[in-house]
Image (cartoon, grey):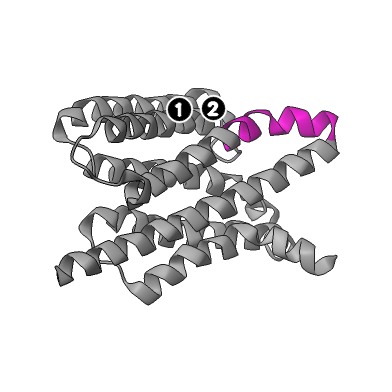
Amino acid sequence: MKLIQFIGNWSEVWALLIPLIVILIHKPKEKTIRPLILYVIIAFILNLTATFMLEYYYLFPSSLQNNNFLYNLHSIVRLFFFSWYIIKITPRKFSFIYTALLSVYIVFVLVDFLFFESPLFISPSLFAAGSFVMLFLCLTFFLRSLQDESGTNWINHPSFIVCAGISLYEAITFFIFLFIYPIAAKNPDFGRLSLKIYQVVFIVFCILLALALYRSKRQQTVAVRT
């Protein structure tokens, strides 16, 4: 049981090792996936630090035993890098809409943390706003791929896999982060179940991200050969 608990507690760290290993072994160099590579590296550092602070909180002074600010930072980092990725694979005619949406998000985050919530604690509003933005970007990507007449097999395309992973992650975790505190306060068992669901979703998300990175490398190799 202790081993299972240890694996679960560190799932947000070792799950990111899956795409990180793909990056280290295959060394994908396509420019469009650079945001994904940077996200994996930064997310690994953030999650490693957050989990270490949680598991070994007694090593830190009381002022440094709260790791919630790292989850807020991770939420912002995830939105920034995946938005960057989606914008890079999007026709320029959509760039104004995406830029306007991200500008509104930045203003929202600043106003929220300056006047309503502390960045030192997990912000349900931040996660909800980030999920809305990411789901909108992914949905517009899916609509474009359905309307595309170029003959591209989007189902196997790395960008499709990435957007599918983001959509799955954001659609489920939106409700978890929005309701986990009030639910956990009334029903701790359900709160623990929600946390386990989040861990499973994050692992699936990392697997899909690793698959997209691997597919990107394969497509790059085929393109060079042809």
Residue under numbered circle 1: 132
Secondary structure, magenta segment, majority class:
helix
Residue at horizontal 42 percent and vertical 62 percent from the top: 41
Q: Which residues are magenta?
A: 173-187
Cα distance, mark 1 to mark 2? Answer: 11 Å
Residue at horizontal 40 percent and vertical 42 percent from the top: 163
222 in magenta: no
- Is residue 35 toward the left or the right of residue 13 in the image? left
Q: Do we see residue 56 in this rendering?
A: no
- Within the image, what quadrant is residue 79 found in? top left
Q: Amino acid at mark 1?
A: Phe
Q: Residue 84 appears at what percent x and percent y? A: 29, 44
Q: Amino acid at mark 2?
A: Ser
**Quarter holding the C terminus?**
bottom left
- Is residue 157 toward the left or the right of residue 113 in the image? left
Secondary element under disc 2, as helix, strand or loop, is helix
Q: Is residue 199 above or below residue 23?
A: above
